[in-house]
Image (spheres, rainbow, N blue to C red):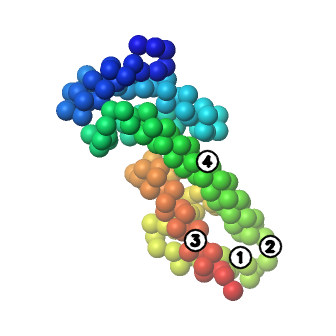
Amino acid sequence: MSKGRMAAQTSADLVHRAQAGDHAAIVGLLECTQQDIRRYARRNCRLEDVDDAVQETMSALAGRVTALRSPAALSGWLFMVVRRECYRLGHWATTALRSRAAAESLAAVAARPDPEIRYDLGMAIQSLPEHYRVIMIKRDLEGRTIAEIAQSQGLTREQVKARLHRARIMIREYLAP
C-alpha cells in the first residue's frame, strides 16, 4: 500500500468486507483512510479543527460504510464528509464567538447600577423554565464552564449548550422592545 493512499484493489476489498459487517475490515479501512482524511482536513479546516474533523469523519465512515454504493466512491465521499465537518466546525466557532459576546453583554447588563434594567433582566430570567434558568444562571452569572454545568446537572455538554442557547434566545425575546 502506498503511503497515505489506498491501493485500489485493497480498498475495494476492504470496503466490501466492511459493508458485510467484518469488524476487522472496518478497522483496516479506518487505518488505511486515516492519512487521506487527515490530508483532506488539513486542506479544508482551520488548524485547530483538523483533529475533530478527522475524528468525526472516521466515525461517519465506521457507522455508514454500508451506505456507500461503490468502493470507488470512497475517496470522494470521505472528501465531502471532511469538507462538511470543517464547515460545521468553523460555523460552530463563529456561532460560539457570537454567543460568548452575548453572554458577556448579558453579564454587563446584570452588573449595571440602573435598577430598571436589572429588574427587567431579573424578570426575564425568572420567566425562563426551570431547566433553562438553572443553566443560564450557572453559566452567565456564576461563570461556570459547560463541563462543570453538565457534570453538576447530569447532562451532556450538548444538552447544556442547547439549553443555554434557547435560554438566551428567550431572554432576548423577553427584553426586546
- Are circles 2 and 1 on residues that touch, CB within 8 Å? yes
Q: Amino acid at mark 2?
A: Pro
Q: CA distance from mark 3 to mark 4?
A: 22 Å
| Residue 169: numbered disc | 3
For marks 2 and 1, the one nearer the N-term is 2
Q: Amino acid at mark 1?
A: Arg
For marks 1 and 4, the one nearer the N-term is 4
For marks 1 and 3, the one nearer the N-term is 1
- Are circles 2 and 3 on residues that touch, CB within 8 Å? no
Give x and y (percent) for residue 98.
Answer: 67, 59
Q: CA distance from mark 2 to mark 1?
A: 8 Å
Q: Amino acid at mark 3?
A: Ile
What SS does tag 3 mark?
Answer: helix
Question: Mark 3 packing: few (<14 Cα in 10 Å), some, or many (20+)?
Answer: few
| Residue 113: numbered disc | 2
Residue drawn at the location 45% of the way across and 25% of the way down? 34
Asked whether, in this view, residue 45 is left or right of residue 112, the answer is left
In this view of the protein, which residue sits in the foreground, 40 or 7?
Answer: 7
Give x and y (percent) for residue 19.
Answer: 24, 34
| Residue 90: numbered disc | 4
Q: CA distance from mark 2 to mark 4?
A: 37 Å
The residue under label 1 is 118
In the displayed structure, 167 sits above or below 9; it is below
For marks 2 and 3, the one nearer the N-term is 2
